[in-house]
Amino acid sequence: MARDEVPTQVATHPPPSKPGGRRRPLIKLSGISKTYRGGTLALSEVDLTVGDGEFVSLLGPSGCGKSTLLRLIAGLGGVSGGTIDWPQSQYDSRGEPIRDLGFVFQEPTLMPWATVFNNIYLPLKLSGVSRTDASPRIDEIIQMVGLEKFADSYPRQLSGGMKMRVSIARALVVKPRILLLDEPFAALDEITRFRLNNDLLTLWQAQKWTVIFVTHSVFESVYLSNRIVVMSARPGRIIADLPIAAPYPRGESFRMSTAYNDFCRTTSSELARAMAGIDEDEH
Amino acid sequence: MAESNQRRTNQGTSTGEIALSVRIITPIVLGILTIALWEFAVRYWQIPKFIIPAPSMIAEALFKDRTVLALSFWSTLKITVAAFCIAAILGISVAVLFVQSKLFEIGLFPYAVILQVTPVVAIAPFILIWVGLDHVERALLILATIVAFFPILSNTTLGLKSVDHNLRNLFDLYGASRFQRLKELEFPSSLPFMLGGLKISGGLALIGAVVAEFVAGSGTDNGLAWRIVESANRLDIPRMFAALLLLSILGISIFFGLSFVENLLLHKWHESAVRREN
């Protein structure tokens, strides 16, 4: 009983919703623009609301400002225009929101002089948690990402996929409400990538955080997210906001399904639209 | 069967790695041969001892004058180590200041360069007049420090600036304080650079001390370099060689000592100290 049309409402976890719809908004971006010092307009008038518990992928060609957007959300660098609101967060004395987020960079970005344990301990150490107090939490998170045997190893002794696991563990050790990932698996081989995708989904379902995932892979974004935001380049702006209303847990059967294919086709055509103006001068 | 055994033994020896025993024994054998040849040549051609003394005579001088040579050794060692430590503390502190404030660097760096490029022999007379008339060892200490200071400063500054940008972002993200950033990020990142600078400076501190002693050339000082000057004046060439030998031993010890520390600190994580596994 193959169904060709996109499945509508299915009992899912978390329940499907219209983009930014019924969920309580966690982050509200309004009219965000970003101009770099050289005068390059990286982002123009971006409006985006991310709700509690969503798994949102930012998808777009390179140079569309998706990484820039992610960094702005993280508070790395200021916006040139527009506002970023955190409706559910408290603000500190300087008027900065307490963001409560974990960030995973494109490279593992580990401290080469520190063991896996100490790399993961870093965020807690910086916020003044003693090693003794942090230890149970770190052991727990190391187990969660499957690196029990490597707690005392140094990054140079690990494979690319393992380094990325450490990087994710470090982001998660502070129990953030929101996890930002900037093309975290782009440099990995496909087998490792699939495995990490599955691990990420499992963790997300268990921990119920909100995820914003930057990627340039249609397949990865469809497989992972319940919402895909397609961006176009020069200047970066949002041109489509697609719900991926497929149930979790998603596994190999989802990857084989017609629904998956349909989502990929829709997303690809939106991405093609995003690329329409830029494919000549890209190379 | 025999063939596969053959292959296995070949694999064991043809890995390109030269055994540690060979690495140690080869230079020792070469050294002993050279000394034997030297001894033989001096005796055979009857070279006068005020031109080149035989190794046996140097050994004799080393033993005969052991008290005075030991005192000289101790004196030069003290100056060198003290100068090295001061240079290290100063160099690292100024580098930290440079990284905290660009203005500091812009203002001070040219003078650090001037200090570095001006030959210490040329500065020595001034320092000796200003502080060295009563306390020559203070003048020696200052001069050796000046020579040893710059590599530590420039290497540490470079190291502190070579921090991975994403790691900097990470520290921003978690709201690290300036001190935390320095202690947890900039300091460990710059460690390989810093240790490289320290290794150069260890040798330079000794050179600085020796040059300064030569320039001071008199009086209250009794370091190894002064011992060389004094022995030359008395045409006591074997003792001159003995003092020279002790200087070399001092230099070698400093180098190996610092290499040992470097290896101790870096061997677990830094590419320079890690054995390649292929």
Image (cartoon, coloured by chain):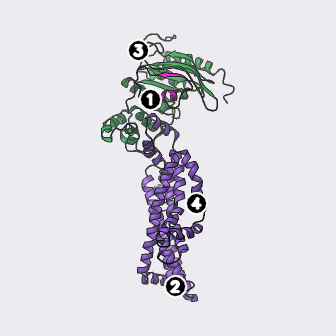
Earlier sequence position, callout 3 versus callout 1 = 3
User: Could one spot residue B15 in this view of the protein?
Assistant: no
Residue A15's disc number: 3
User: Which residue appears at 55% of the width and 73% of the height?
Assistant: B215
Query: How far, Cα to Cα, is label 3 from label 1?
Result: 37 Å
Q: Amino acid at mark 3?
A: Pro
Mark 2–mark 3 CB contact (< 8 Å): no
Indicate which disc residue A94 carries.
1
Please tell me if label 3 and label 1 are on a single chain. Answer: yes
Q: Nearer the viewer, residue B116 or B156?
A: B116
Give the SS element for disc 1. Answer: loop
Q: Position of residue A14 (x, y in %)?
A: 40, 17
Label 1 lies in what chain?
Answer: A
Q: CA distance from mark 2 to mark 3?
A: 96 Å
In front here: A257 or A132? A132
Residue behind mark 2: B236
Q: Are marks 1 and 4 in contact (CB under 8 Å)?
A: no
**Mark whose residue sits in front, 1 or 2:** 1
Q: Is residue B260 magenta?
A: no
